[in-house]
Image (spheres, helix red, strand yellow):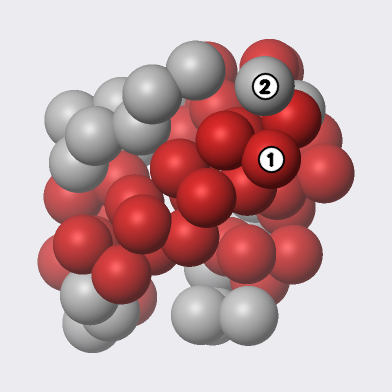
Amino acid sequence: MVITKDTVIGDILDTDFDVAPLFLEIGMHCLGCPASRSESIAEACEVHGTDADELVNKLNAHFAKKA
């Protein structure tokens, strides 16, 4: 899976829930909320005041290890 800022959080979590700590470490503690599951990385990072590019890089690194 290749992650972009437009990728929906729910799709990422459905593919591999092991990435949940990457969201939690930047303050996204609402992963079970239906609204958060339908947000893109960009939307969620804007709400939480975090760097979307940094999260995308971490997520892609995680998925690259699994390939």
Q: How many marks?
A: 2
Report how far apart the C-alphas of labels 1 and 2 lie in the structure. 6 Å
Mark 1 and 2 residues: CB-CB less than 8 Å, in contact?
yes
Image quarter of residue 16: top right
Image quarter of residue 32: top right
> Looking at the picture, how far across and down is residue 19, in whole percent?
70, 48
Instruction: Name the residue located 48 percent from the left edge and 60 percent from the top edge.
Output: 58
Q: As displayed, is residue 11 above or below residue 28?
A: above
Image quarter of residue 29: bottom right
Residue most extreme to the right: 18
Q: Residues within 10 Å of mark 2 (few under 14, many from 20)?
A: few
| Left-right relation of 15 to 50 | right
Q: Nearer the viewer, residue 27 or 1?
A: 1
> Looking at the picture, how far across and down is residue 47, in whole percent?
24, 68
Q: As displayed, is residue 5 above or below residue 50?
A: above
Please say whether residue 34 is visible from this viewpoint. Answer: no
On-image quarter of the C terminus? top right
Q: Residue under label 1, please give it.
A: 65
Q: As displayed, is residue 33 above or below residue 67?
A: below
Considering the numbered disc 1 on the image, is that residue within a helix, a strand or a loop? helix
Instruction: Name the residue located 72 percent from the left edge and 52 percent from the top edge.
Output: 20
Instruction: Name the residue located 69 percent from the left edge and 40 percent from the top edge.
Output: 65
Please say whether residue 53 is visible from this viewpoint. Answer: yes
Instruction: Name the residue located 38 percent from the left edge and 24 percent from the top edge.
Output: 2
Q: Residue under label 2, please give it.
A: 67
| Left-right relation of 41 to 14 | left
Considering the numbered disc 2 on the image, is that residue within a helix, a strand or a loop? loop
